[in-house]
Image (spheres, rainbow, N blue to C red):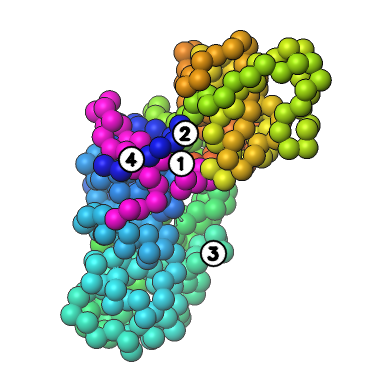
Amino acid sequence: MDDFHRDTWAEIDLDAIHDNVANLRRFLPDGTRVMAVVKANAYGHGDAQVAETALEAGASYLAVAFLDEALALRKKGVNAPILVLGASRPMDVALAARHRIALTVFRADWLEQASSVYTGPDPVYLHLKMDTGMGRLGVKDGEETKRIMTLINRHPRFILEGAYTHFATADELNTDYLSYQYSRFLHMLEWLPARPPLVHCANSAAALRFPDRAFNMVRFGISMYGLAPSTDIKPLLPYELKEAFSLHSRLVHVKKLQPGEKVSYGATYTAKAEEWIGTIPIGYADGWLRRLQHFHVLVNGQKVPIVGRICMDQCMIRLPEPLPIGTKVTLIGHQGDETISIDDVARHLGTINYEVPCTISYRVPRIFFRNKRIMELRNAVCHG
Ligand SMILES: *Cc1c(COP(=O)(O)O)cnc(C)c1O
C-alpha cells in the first residue's frame, strides 16, 4: 500500500463503476459483450483498479489508446484481453503479441511492414478499423480492405479478431449522421469475406441509446465512470449512472483579513469587510485550473467561493466563519445536501465532462473504495 503525505486526494468509488458495468450488461441484449475503455489511466480514475472492477462486473475485454497503456496494465497483473484503439508501430507487433495485446489495423503498408518484421511464435490479434465518417483512423475503400485481408491471410500468425468503427455524433439528439455511419459500416463489412468474431461500433452513447444495433460488443467509456456522454442525451439515459470520482482537500491555513486586504497573485481579490480566508493545497498543477477562479467548493455542507487567482499548488476560499485547520473541503462530490458534479465543473470551464477527471493530475493521489471500504491508497503514477 502506497502512502501519501498530502491533504488533497481523489476518491474513486469502484462500487459505482461495478454497478455501471453490471447495469449495462443487464440492459444489453444477451450475447453482447462489454469492452471497458480504460485509456488515459481510466479517464483519470486509475487504470488497473477500474479494469479489475469492470472485469468483475462482467466486462470481457479492455481497451486503451496506446500500446504503452496496455503494457502498463500487464505489468500490474491484468491478464484480460486488451485492444489498442490507436495507432501502434509495425516494429512493436512482437511486443504486443508476447503480451496478448490486440492491435488496430487500418493500412495495408503497415501490415506489409509488420509482416516483414514479425517472425515470433505468438498469434497477433488484429481489429480492422473502418472509417465510416469520423475522419480519424480507418480504411475507407474496398481495395485497401482487400489488400489488408490478403496480407493477414498470408501471414501464419496474424488473426483478424475484430472489425469496428467509431461514431462522431452518437451523443447528439439528431441521429441523421449516426444512421449514415451505421449503414456505411454495414456496407463496409460486406467487403470482408466473413465477419470476424468481434464486431463493434458503439461507444457509451450509442450503447445506451441503441443497444440493439451494437453487433456483439460495445466499447464502454465515459458512462462506466457514471457520466453522461453529453448534456443533450442525459435525460434519455435508460438507467441511473453512478458517478465514481470525487475530489477533496483540507484547510491548511485560516486567517482573518481586514477590509481592503488582498488575496493571491495579481492582488485581484480585495476583502470588502472582515473576512475569513482559508487556504487549500490544490492548484492548477493538480488540474484545478486557473479558470475555476470564480467557481466554488463545499465546506461543512455549504457552497463557498474560490477567491483570488488559483496558484500552481494552492488556492484560497472565503469561509463563512473561522473553521479549524483540517476541515474537509470537497471540490467535486457531495457534502450534506450540496453537490458539485463533474458536469458542474465542466460547465464552468466551458468544456465536456470527459476532460475534467483526465485533467486531475498524477500529483493527486487516488483512494479506491470497494464494498464501501477503503481498498487501496495509491498515487496515480505507477510505482510498479
Ligand atoms: C475513447 C473511445 C471510446 C469510448 O467512448 P465513450 O464516449 O467514452 O464511451 C470508444 N471507442 C473509441 C475508438 C474511443 O477512442
| Residue 189 is covered by the magenta coloring | no
**Real-space Cα separation, disc 1 to disc 3, in angstroms:** 32 Å
Between residue 195 and residue 285, name the one nearer to us. 285
Relative to 51, is 164 on the left or the right?
A: right
Please name the residue that numbered disc 2 is placed on: 8
Answer left or right for 343 relative to 105.
right
* Residue at x 35% of width, y 36% of height: 367
Circle on res. 364: 1
| Label 1 vs 4, first from the N-terminus | 4
Q: Label 3: which residue?
A: 136
| Label pair 4/3, CB-CB below 8 angstroms | no
Q: Which residues are magenta?
A: 358-384
Q: How many marks?
A: 4
The crowd level at tag 1 (other Cα within 10 Å; few <14, some 14-19, many 20+) is many
Q: Nearer the viewer, residue 380 or 170?
A: 380
In front: mark 2 or mark 3?
2
